[in-house]
Structures are given as structure tokens and as C-alpha cells.
Image (tube, rainbow, N blue to C red):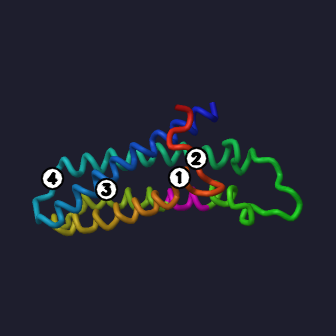
Amino acid sequence: MDTGLVHLHNLLRWVILFLLVWSLFRAYTGWKSGSVFQQGDRKIWLITMIVSHVTGLLGIYQVLWGRIGWFTHPALPEGESVMSNKGLRFFLVEHPLLMLLAIVFITMGYRLSKKPFTDKMKYTKATLYFLIALIAILVAIPWPFRAEVGRTWFPGM
């Protein structure tokens, strides 16, 4: 089951990246063109938020009870800490914190679409929040070219 959840978590990474880039593009073009806020944008942002939350829940399960989770990982050798081990530090500290931060910014981007701001303000803030979320996600993904933490592009496929 654990392997299947890791693969689902990885697959949803690509869905989130696609939706987030799409949301960012729509917010940026709405901001720069000065257009009226569209309900279609709110729906895209909602779907982006839902997928990010589902992926986040899968990730929280992996961090707590997965293969190298906090509650299932065997004890470290004497004198070694999670912070001194690059692989464990990435998967147990850096990746979860940056991804949770990204989910918070995606949620903030969606939530402001329901606030009584001007259309330009909605698009401007959404662009900023989605851009921060995208940067955090791109930094926190275990890309194949990253030493010691890299994963394949599509594990299990």
C-alpha cells in the first residue's frame, strides 16, 4: 500500500504543477489585462486547492507512517541526527515544510477570490500567492538531478 500511495503522491505532483501554472497564468493575464474577475478562474483555483490538499494529506501520511516516516523509520545510528543526514532531512523536514507552505499560499490565493476586493486586487494577490507556491513546490520536489534525494520522473511507471 505504501508504494501505491507514493506513486499516487508523485502523480498528483504533475497535476498540481499543471493546475498551478494554469492558475498563475490566468491570474497574471487577468491582472495585466485589467479584466473583470471570472467565475471560471475561481473554479480553476478551487480545483488547484483541492488537489493540493489531497496531495498534502497523502504526503502527511508518508511523513508520519511511510517508509521513512517519523513513526516507522528505524532508529538512527548513534551520534547521527535527522538534520545531519541530507536524505532524511529533505524528506522529513524540508520537503514537508515547503509543501505545506505552498498549500497555504494556494489556499490563500483561492480564498481571496471570495473576498470583496476589486478585480485587479484579486488577480494581483492571486498572482503573487500562486507564484510563491510554485517556487516553493519547484524547490521542494525531489527532482532526478538532485544528489542524494532525487527520484525518477515517474516512479512505478
Say which of 144 and 92 sits in front.
Answer: 144
Q: Earlier in the sequence, mark 3 or mark 4?
A: 4
Q: Which mark is residue 156?
A: none
Q: Which mark is residue 110?
A: 3
Answer yes or no: do the residues labelled 3 and 2 have beta carbons within 8 Å?
no
Q: Tell me which secondary structure the magenta stretch mostly adopts.
A: helix
Which quadrant holds the N terminus? Answer: top right
Q: Which mark is residue 38?
A: 4
Q: Residue at x 52, y 58 (%)?
A: 140
Q: Earlier in the sequence, mark 3 or mark 2?
A: 3
Q: Residues within 10 Å of mark 2 (few under 14, many from 20)?
A: some
Determine the CA span between mark 3 and mark 1.
27 Å
Q: Earlier in the sequence, mark 1 or mark 4?
A: 4
Q: Earlier in the sequence, mark 4 or mark 2?
A: 4
Classify residue 6 by image quadrant.
Answer: top right
The magenta span reads 94-100
| Left or right, residue 119 beside residue 44 | left
Mark 1, residue position: 143
Indicate which label's residue lies in the foreground, 4 or 2. 2
Mark 2, residue position: 151
Q: Earlier in the sequence, mark 3 or mark 1?
A: 3
Q: Residues within 10 Å of mark 4 (few under 14, many from 20)?
A: few
